[in-house]
Amino acid sequence: MDFSLSPRAADLRERVHAFVTSEVEPIEAEAHHRITRLRESGGDNWTPDPVIAELQAKAREQGLWNLFLPAEHAGSYAADFGTDGGEGLTNVDYAAVAEVMGRSFLAPLVFNSNAPDTGNMEVLLKYGTDEQRAQWLEPLLRAEIRSAFCMTEPAIASSDATNMAATARIEGDEVVINGRKWWSTGVGNPDCKIFVFMGLSDPDADRHSRHTMVLVPRDAAGVKVERMLTTMGYYDEPLGHGEVSFTDVRVPVGNVLLGPGRAFEIAQGRLGPGRVHHCMRAIGLAERALELACARAVSRTAFGKPIANLGGNRERIADARIAINRSRLLVMHAAWLLDQGMSREAYSAVSEIKVEVPNMALGVIDMAIQLHGGGGMSDDFPLANAWVGARSLRLADGPDEVHRNVIAKIELGKYTS
C-alpha cells in the first residue's frame, strides 16, 4: 500500500497548513475570549464572529474550500461552489489535509469542512434527489446555511441505534415526526436551517430496515430547540450541541432520503469517511498539543533546570511522538482501505482508529496540560478545550465499547463458521 500523497494533495496540505498557522491560530484565542465575554455578559454568543466570514472569504479565494468533497463529485461542483477546480481528493489525500485543519477549533469552519455539515453534505451528494440538493446542498456548499444531524436520543441507549424511538411515520404524502433528540451538533448557530432526522418508521420490519432519514427544516411547525448542552462546561459556540423536540412535525414525503427504511444504509455510507475525518483532526490536535508541550518544556525552568529535564518529561515527549505517528499510520491505513471499497477489513480498520486515536490524543493533551501547570487547565491555552474535544470523541460516532465489539466480531469471525 502506498500512503504517499498525490502532488495536488501535498500542495493543498502545505497551503492549508500555511493558512492555519498564519491566519487562524493567531486570532483563535481572542475569538474564544470574545465568545466567553459575550456569554458572561448575556450577549449574543451564538452568532458567528465576523472574523470567521472574513477568513472564509480568504480561504475560498485561495481555493481552500469544500476540500472534503469526494472525488466523484468535486469536479461537477468546482465552478460554482469554490473548490480549487480539481477532481477531488481520495480518503488518503483528504486525511492529510484534515489533520492540519484539526490544529484549530476554528479551522474546519473556516474551510467549510466542519462536522456535521460535511457528513450531511455527503449524504445529500450520495443519496439526495436533485430537488433536495438544489434546496439544501448548494447553500451548504456556499456556507450560506448550516445543518444538524439528529440521531442520539436522551431516553434510550443510543449506542445501539436500533433502539431509536423517535418516529418518522409516512402518512399519505407527508412524514409525521415525533420525539426528542439531543447532542444535535450545530443547532445553536442561527444559520442552522436544516436537520437530518433519523426516526422509526416501521417497527415490524427487519431491525435494520425500521428507520428512515428525513430532511426537516428548522422552522417547521413543531420543531423546538429545548436547550443548549454544555460539554464539560463548554458550549462549543458558534455551533453547539442541543436538545430538540419534534411534536407532530409534518414535512413532504419528498423530504425522505433514499427511501423509507433505508436509514442504516445511509448511516454506514456516511460514517466511514466521517470517522477518518474526525480521527485525523484529532491527530492534528495532538500534534499542536505536543508542539506546545515542547515549547513549554524548553522555555520554563524549575529547580535550576528546564522542565524538559525533570521528572521523566523527555520520555513522555518521546512516547507522545511515537503514539502520534502510530495513530497516523493506522488512520492512513483505514483511509487507504476505504479508497479500495467498504470491505470487512475496512470496517474493522475504521473501528480500530475510532478507539485508538481519541485515547492517544487524550494522553498527549494531558501530558501537555501537566507541563503547563495551572495554566494548562485555563483558557489561556487551547489545551483544556482540546482535551474536552478529544474526550467527547470517545463517545461521538459510537463509543469505544461498540467499536471494540465490531473489531472483535470481525476478528473472531475468521475462526468460526
Image: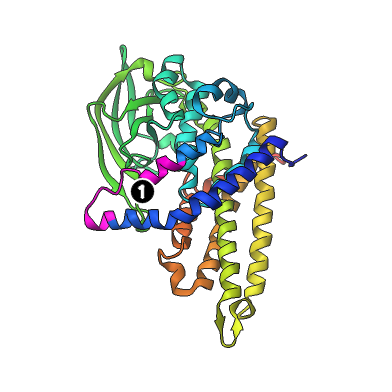
Position of residue 314 measured from the top left corner of the image (x, y, whole percent): 66, 73
Residue at point 29% right, 38% down? 244
Judged from this view, the residue extending furthest toward the top is 172
Observer able to see residue 404: no
Position of residue 214 measured from the top left corner of the image (x, y, whole percent): 38, 24
Range of magenta residues: 38-55
Work out whether residue 221 or residue 209 is closer to the camera in this orientation and state it.
221
User: Where 139 falls versus 324 (above or below)?
Assistant: above
Figure coloring: rainbow
**Which quadrant of the figure has residue 257?**
top left
Local secondary structure at mark 1:
loop
> Left or right: 262 with respect to 1?
left
Quarter the C terminus occupies: top right
Work out whether residue 258 or residue 404 is closer to the camera in this orientation and state it.
258
What's under tag 1, amino acid-wise?
A: Glu
Judged from this view, the residue extending furthest toward the right is 1
Residue at point 30% right, 26% down? 177
Position of residue 164 measured from the top left corner of the image (x, y, whole percent): 39, 35
Q: What residue would you read off at disc 1?
A: 237
Quarter the N terminus occupies: top right
> Left or right: 303 with respect to 321?
left
Residue at point 49% right, 50% down? 24
> Left or right: 90 with respect to 234?
right
